[in-house]
Image (cartoon, grey):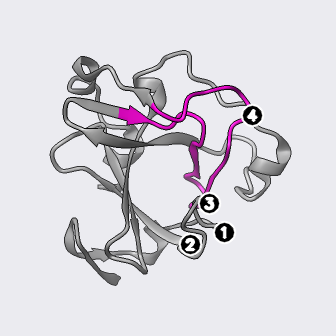
Amino acid sequence: MMRMNTNRFGILQINADELFLFPQGLIGMEALRQWALLPDPQTPNVAWLQSVSRGDRAIPLISPRAFFEDYRVHLGRRELGSLHLRPGAELYIMTTISGREDKITTNLRAPILLNLDRRLGCQVIADNEMPIQQTLPLKRQLVMPAPSFLKRAA
């Protein structure tokens, strides 16, 4: 068990094998490589990537397909290489969110990919013309179920 002191969640006890390794870090935070994925206690369809080494770094995430059913990411082998995907591996695509309660946006251009089997992650710039700030339909936000992988991890 690892002990983490975080600004958002207080002191956490997390098994090291539950962490995600981001070999290249995240855009703008390349030095931060180990992250914990945590469910949001108040909003079931939001998860948080919490940095292991920086307690003040937590990034809110959603599953974009819960809000935009036609969302697709086109990726090449280079982008997927760092995830070491095997046939049948569980790949989860998430996007960052930001804003205020009355207007929340998500970055559909730079999704975060998670290989749930190998606990590896990466952030990519999608080659399609997705918006960097896409407004979320807030009415749907309250009724979407939590992603299944968060139920397993909780």
**Residue depicted at x 19% and y 35%:** 101
Q: Could you tell me which residue is drawn at 27 percent across and 30 percent down?
A: 103
Q: Horizontal placement of 23 versus 58: left or right?
A: right
Q: In the image, what residue type sits under mark 4? A: Asp
Q: Earlier in the sequence, mark 2 or mark 4?
A: 2
Nearer the observer: mark 4 or 3; the answer is 4
Examine the image and state in which quarter residue 58 appears.
bottom left
The magenta span reads 105-133
User: Disc 2 or disc 4, which is closer to the eye?
Assistant: 4
Residue 132 is one of the magenta-drawn residues: yes
Q: Nearer the viewer, mark 2 or mark 3?
A: 2
Tag 2: amino acid:
Arg
Crowding at dot 2, Cα within 10 Å, few <14 / some 14-19 / many 20+, comes out as many
Element type at mark 3: loop
Say which label, 3 or 1, has the lower sequence index. 1
| SS of the residue under disc 4 | loop
Mark 3 → mark 1, Cα distance in angstroms: 12 Å
Q: Magenta stretch containing residue 86, yes or no?
A: no
Q: Which residue is mark 2?
A: 33
In the picture as drawn, the residue positioned furthest to the right comes out as 77
Pointer 4 or 1: first along the chain: 1
> Could you classify mark 1 by the number of other residues whose Cα lies within 10 Å: few (under 14), some (14-19), or many (20 or more)?
some
Label 4 with label 1: CB-CB less than 8 Å: no
- Determine crowd level at label 3: few under 14, some 14-19, many 20+ residues with C-alpha closer than 10 A: some
> Could you tell whether 124 is left or right of 13 in the image?
right
Q: Quick one: which residue is furthest to the left in this view? A: 42
Q: Which mark is residue 127?
A: 4
Q: Which mark is residue 23?
A: 1
Secondary element under disc 2, as helix, strand or loop, is: loop
Q: Which residue is mark 3?
A: 118
Position of residue 76 measured from the top left corner of the image (x, y, whole percent): 82, 40
Per the model, the C-alpha gap separating discs 2 and 3 is 15 Å
